[in-house]
Image (spheres, helix red, strand yellow):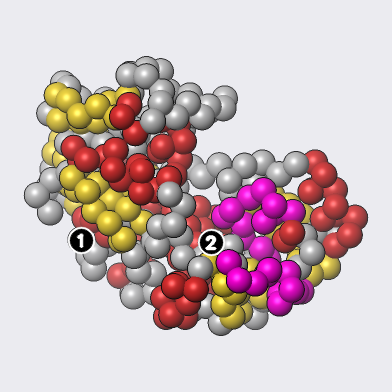
Amino acid sequence: MNAIRVHEYGGPAALSYEEVPRPEPDDDEVLVRVEAAGVNPIDWMVREGYADDALDPALPYVPGWDLSGVVAQTGDGVSAFEPGDEVFGLVGMPDPGETYAEYAAVPATDVVEKPESLGHHAAAAVPMAALTARRALFEEADLGGGERVLVHAAAGGVGHFAVQLADHVDAEVVGTASASNASFLADLGVDDFVDYRNREFEAVVDDVDVVLDCVGGETLARSVDVVAEGGRIVTLPESPTDAVVERARTERMATVDWFSVEPDAAALAELRELADGGVVRPTVNGVWPLSEAAAAHEESASGHVRGKLVLSVGET
């Protein structure tokens, strides 16, 4: 089969399109014929050599954690699926999910039935980003209806799902993005839009109950100034500094949390129902063939992607 492999950490050229043996599923795994694989910022960060105690794959490795495809074979201990089932999921994490390939052997507990309303390209765009948004808003921040939430980078992968999920529970949504995304975000559910290139958000926003920070750095530090007393900040790019956590606590009695997303089949099944109900719709901004994964990584690393990017692996 064909797959992308990384033999040395580095730039996009480190992604090698080559023929590799087709994997065999273990007893608790399913072999999925991958139709599409989602591209996420963590994919190219790991490719460049980003590593922590969890995300440090041994070389060579096949990148990717998001997939949508068709079950081709089941392990001896798997009864929940059978060949021909269409599935999608965030798989394997923190171990390599190896979804940038024509076939992937993945834990059966990491995938669920694909939304009927979505094709494979759209379905592959959902798992990591939507699971991250869901956990950030409802598990880490405990967002409730009627509360006010500020979503930074609201037009991005995680952000555009967060907007839809927050709007679904009747939260008031403030979103930051470039001006070109204003109408796109209004259609998704943003009530108040801030063009971050022309206005400092802290000059026009205050007293938000929840901040979802998809940017980090200075944006996270400045977010302390707009969170309401007793509010909650969830930041995604990296663990917050002690200084930011302490300032939020002393000045606002607010919390600042960070987490690493994990496979969650139950939560993904809920998102599937929301997708089939028309509540959550992924925006796919670009589709590349598997052989052009390097171009997809370059686009993702630009930092200006609306919605998600996807690799087309099968015939879908």
Horizontally, is 214 left or right of 113 in the view? Answer: right
Q: Which of marks 1 and 2 is in front?
A: 2
Secondary structure beneath label 1: loop
Q: What element carries label 2?
A: loop
Say which quadrant the N terminus sits in: top left
Mark 2 Cα shell of 10 Å, populated few (<14), some (14-19), many (≥20): many
Q: According to the image, label 2 marks what residue? A: 153
Tell which of 286 and 69 is nearer to you.
Answer: 286
Residue type at mark 1?
Answer: Gly
Instruction: Look at 27% across and 56% down and name the residue there.
Output: 286
Question: Residue 117 appears in which quarter of the rendering?
Answer: bottom left
Of the numbered discs 1 and 2, the one sitting upstream in the chain is: 1
Q: Position of residue 222 (x, y in %)?
A: 74, 59
Give the magenta part as a residue range. 197-221
Residue 284's spot in the image, x, y percent? 30, 61
> Is mark 1 in CB contact (under 8 Å) with mark 2?
no
Cα separation, mark 1 vs mark 2, equals 26 Å
Q: Tell me the amino acid under the disc marked 2.
A: Ala
Q: Nearer the viewer, residue 263 or 48?
A: 48
Q: Residue at x 59, y 49 (%)?
A: 236
Residue occupied by mark 1: 119
